Each structure stands twice: as C-alpha cells, then as structure tokens.
Image (cartoon, rainbow, N blue to C red):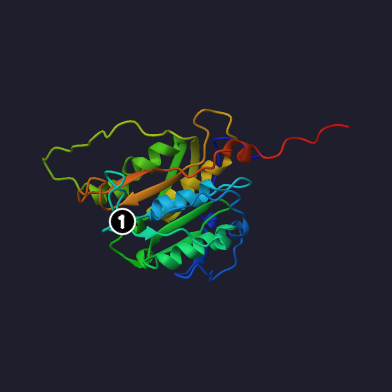
C-alpha cells in the first residue's frame, strides 16, 4: 500500500490512452481501466454530461473512476440543477454499461464535441474536442515548475491560481497602482494532503497530477478520499468568469475499494 496522503509524481505519469468521438482508443489502455466492470449501473434517464459521467462511475463496485473535466465555454454546471447547461446523454444500452470502455464509448458517441484520455489507473481527463491544441485555452498554459508539500488537494483544485503564479498572472494581471482584489467563495472539500514536484507541465497536467496523487489514500481519515476536478470558463450562474472545483464520482463502497483486500486469514 502506498503511503497515505503523500506521493511524489514525475511528469511521466502523463502517458495516456486517447478516446475518439466513437469511444475507440488510438493507443493501448496501459492502465487497464477500460476493461474494469460497472457492476451496478444507475444510469436510467437522460442526464447532462457531468451527471452521466458521475452516474457511470458510481455504478462501479470493485474499482473506482474519477474525472478531470474541462467544460466548453458554452457549457457549465447547471444552476439551478435542473436547468439545461450541458450536452445531454441518454442511457446507454445495457451491454454498453458493463465496462468502463463500453460506457465511455457510448457517452462520447452521443457527445462527439468532447473527447477523453485515460491518465492513470483511476483518472480520466475530459475536454472539448481540440482543446489541448488551443493556445488560448488557459489549461494549456505552460508552467516551468510546480512544487507543493503537504497541500490539501481540494484547495489546489478549487483555487489553482493561489498555487500556480503563472496562472494567477494570466487570470488576474496586476494593474500598476491599482488594488488587487481576491474573493473568498466559501469552504471547499479539503481532500487529502499531496506532495508534488513536476517540471515543464501545463495547468491541465498539474490538475491531473493532483487528482492522481489522491489515488494514494487509504480511506482511513475523514478527508482521505480520491478527488477529481472540473473547470468551466463560465460560472454556474452563467457569468463569464472561470469556475474551478472538486468533482467527486466515488461509488458507495469506495473506502473498501481503496483499502483493497485484507491480509490472508490464517488457517
């Protein structure tokens, strides 16, 4: 078992398996995530994309899956929850809900404006088609180095500009002689503490690395849970300002899954 709450991750963790609009993979699934079963599907009605992804992951029992999600500028988290704000996904055929690969393949067949990458054994990166090649996408901002020691994952994922000076300068350029205003938006899920030292990475890769680092937890503490992330250029209220947050998609038995099987019983 990896040491809880701390993990040193090199940039090599960012090898990926890429999903096309039809859900096919252009590279081998080196992490084996696509073959993992969804034992108890709970996808029974049309849902916004983020709800659909959450429902598929929450139907797992022997494994878990989390997401790092970039929403397109026109899409956002619904506010109020029932309002249409994202592409809708209809329940996939039963045979497509039996595995992660079948589930994601059907989701992105219905929503071809998005694509995905598998970045670890548990973490899947979701983004608008072509977003990774967009030089104006803030998540593609390149950072020479990123170092944190024992920082709460939830704080990094919700307030990344406080941990990435280059991102802060991009989003909030200083005006000589002008006041600098930082708004407190309330408490965030702290998540586990993580330690990271990565070099020459994008903001997207940093957020993914933080989520992957949370996979090292053992579920023993109150805040010891894996957590994904979500970003939208548009706030849930519809305002044209960036929104960052923690995205949770854990199954009900996630603590048993992260702890793994216990030691053999002596006979």
Residue matched to label 1: 138
Q: Is 195 positioned to the left or the right of 82 in the image?
A: right
> Residue 147: which quarter of the image?
top left
Q: Residues within 10 Å of mark 1 (few under 14, many from 20)?
A: some
User: Vertically, is 46 above or below 62?
Assistant: below
**Foreground: 139 or 223?**
223
> Residue 113: which quarter of the image?
bottom left
User: Vertically, is 262 above or below 202?
Assistant: above
Which residue lies at the image location 13% right of the left edge and 44% below the top edge? 176
Report helix, strand or loop for mark 1: helix
The picture places residue 136, in percent across and down from the top left corner, at 28, 62
Q: Is 117 positioned to the left or the right of 29 in the image?
A: left
Q: Quadrant of the N terminus?
A: top right
Which residue lies at the image location 33% right of the left edge and 40% below the top edge? 159
- Asked if one can make out residue 191 in the rendered structure from this viewpoint, the answer is yes
- Asked if one can make out residue 217 in the rendered structure from this viewpoint, the answer is no
**Foreground: 205 or 56?**
56
User: Vertically, is 262 above or below 88?
Assistant: above
The picture places residue 231, in percent across and down from the top left corner, at 34, 50
Q: Quadrant of the C terminus?
A: top right
């Amino acid at each position: 078992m990896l040491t809880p709450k701390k993990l040193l991750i090199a940039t090599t963790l960012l090898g990926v398996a890429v999903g096309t609009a039809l859900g096919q993979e252009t590279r081998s699934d080196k992490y084996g995530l696509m073959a993992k079963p969804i034992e108890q599907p709970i996808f029974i009605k049309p849902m916004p994309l983020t709800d659909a992804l959450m429902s598929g992951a929450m139907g797992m029992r022997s494994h878990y899956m989390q997401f790092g999600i970039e929403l397109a500028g026109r899409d956002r988290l619904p506010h109020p929850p029932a309002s249409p704000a994202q592409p809708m996904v209809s329940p996939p055929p039963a045979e497509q809900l039996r595995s992660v690969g079948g589930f994601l393949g059907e989701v992105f067949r219905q929503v071809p404006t998005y694509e995905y990458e598998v970045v670890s054994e548990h973490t899947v990166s979701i983004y608008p088609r072509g977003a990774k090649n967009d030089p104006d996408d803030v998540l593609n901002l390149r950072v020479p180095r990123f170092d944190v020691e024992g920082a709460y994952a939830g704080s990094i994922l919700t307030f990344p500009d406080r941990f990435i000076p280059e991102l802060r300068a991009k989003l909030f350029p200083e005006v000589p002689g002008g006041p600098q205003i930082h708004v407190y938006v309330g408490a965030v899920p702290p998540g586990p503490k993580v330690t990271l030292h990565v070099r020459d990475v994008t903001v997207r890769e940093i957020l993914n690395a933080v989520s992957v680092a949370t996979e090292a937890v053992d579920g023993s503490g109150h805040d010891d849970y894996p957590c994904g992330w979500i970003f939208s250029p548009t706030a849930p209220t519809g305002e044209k300002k960036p929104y960052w947050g923690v995205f949770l998609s854990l199954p009900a038995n996630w603590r048993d899954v992260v702890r793994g099987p216990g030691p053999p019983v002596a006979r």
